[in-house]
Image (spheres, helix red, strand yellow):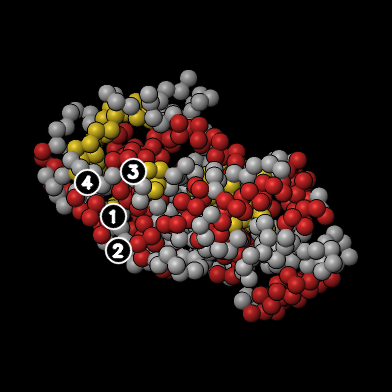
Amino acid sequence: MFERLPVEVVFFGEPFDRDAIIHTLRHLAMRIGWTFRPRAERRIIYATTENPLEIPVREGDLVILSSHDVKKHMTESRAGIPLRGENAERFPFYHPKANDIHQRGWIKADVIAGAHALFNLLYERKNRPEKRDGWMRFTEDWWTAAGFARPEPLSDFWLNSIAFEAEKIGWPRAERQGEDAVSLAPGTVVLTHDVDYMPTRANRGMPRFLRAVLRQLLTRRSAGQAWQIMSKYRKAFFQPVPYNALKSIADEETILGAISSFQFTVKRRHRSDPVYDLRRYYNTEDDLRNLLHRGFEVCLHGSYRAGRTPGQLAVEKIELEGILGMSVSGHRQHYLNFHPATFFPELERAGLEYDMSVGYNDMSGPRAGTLFPFRPYDMEKAKPFSMWEIPFILMDTTLATTYRFSSGEALDHCIDQIRPVEKSGGCVSLIWHQEQLSGLLDPGFDRIYWILLKKLKERGIRLTSGRVVVEEIAALWNQTIGD
Ligand SMILES: [Zn+2]
């Protein structure tokens, strides 16, 4: 039987947001098996004071030091999170009197505020105009100015520092045993396929084929690969419709014991949207029905402006549910075109249970500094949002067009990115576009997806859909607060 450790959170001084602190701490509690409740023997003291000596500490208490500068930064500053230390060992919001503290069990930086700022994309919220269309490039975010070459799992590192410190002062360590234990280890990868293109029987994917050839010539500057697509397309033309890999993806994933989510837009509303009309498509093809019957998940791929248009995600979710005849829980925004200040409220308003849009189009890695699902927090209303965010850290087209990797390099890169997820028992999603897996986009990038899946499976990593993960993680989350 798995015993959760009861922990009390005590506030000393006026924190930047009491509910946000408890909410952020629950992410750690979920992973390591703590339950917050009043009057527990183990106490975390979250202290907001300029004078640490005045904090009333008992033997065995864990102290997290914060100062009034934290709230000031959160509300007034447009700068990135202030950090101190070297490379990955950097801590956020160092306390001004940190150098005077030498006791065990004291965390001299406000690691909770740091994780809260990263989870909620605070820098982007403050600095990017809400009306500006498009997605956040990695170099526009705060990382580069802070000296990072890539996103790092800093939120995880900061929250974990609390667990490490607790262990140092003798708190019992949660063991991952028993049926009700923390069950994410040894890592989960949520497989997702954005469906940005569907051919018709009449055009046989010809428009996509022409774009794919141009993409090889202009973006990837590879005449050889353009030639490969042309000769492959010639063969595919006489077989099942080119660029429709829905069935073959489901077949191969089933053989591997994997399951995945497919993100569909409902219809074209903007020139950057996929060109298909799902209502018409669904009536003429049985691919969607086939996916659903086999336990695969269909999620909404919000149209280009949906995440920025009040009420639009809700409309599209209802439309998709009408077509499928069943409820939809997951979402990813097409082109990641969103602003965090308006996007998260729109997801909640639509009644979506989870989203997978937090990542970069032009860089692999954890944009919110975490390799775990998390719940964004409504900074305006000072309360948690109802939905989950499953971060995505890898996308096929980023590897092909931004990094311009060969397929072999791309495979090594994917393994490198997933290694820390495996190590920490995390859970992230990755995107491999539907049309990529038809083999007619970036030659070799279909094959490495299947090699990657086999390698992950060999390492004991679970390959599943978002809905499965969210159900499990919501159950773990509920156990982090006692009566
Ligand atoms: Zn898309």
Mark 1 or 4, closer to the camera: 1
Quadrant hosting residue 193:
bottom right
Q: Verify CB contact (< 8 Å) between mark 1 and mark 3.
A: no
Residue 203 in view here: yes
**Which circle marks residue 20 in the picture?**
3
Q: Would you place residue 99 above or below residue 438 in this image?
A: above
Sequence-wise first label, 3 or 4? 3
Residue position marked by numbered label 4 in the rendering: 66
Q: Verify CB contact (< 8 Å) between mark 1 and mark 4.
A: no
Residue 422 in view here: no
Category of crowding for the residue at label 2, using alpha-carbon neighbours closer than 10 angstroms: few (below 14), some (14–19), many (at least 20): some
Quadrant hosting residue 150:
bottom left
**Residue 237: image location, x then y, percent:** 85, 67
Residue at figure coordinates x 53%, y 54% from the top left: 311
Q: Is mark 4 within 8 Å of ligand 1?
A: no
Element assignment for label 2: loop
Disc 1/disc 3 C-alpha distance (Å): 12 Å
**Residue 440: image location, x then y, percent:** 74, 66
Residue type, numbered disc 3:
Ala
Residue at figure coordinates x 40%, y 67% from the top left: 129
Mark 2 or 4, closer to the camera: 2
Q: Would you place residue 214 above or below residue 355 in this image?
A: below
Q: Would you place residue 103 above or below residue 177 in this image?
A: below
**Residue 137: image location, x then y, percent:** 46, 67
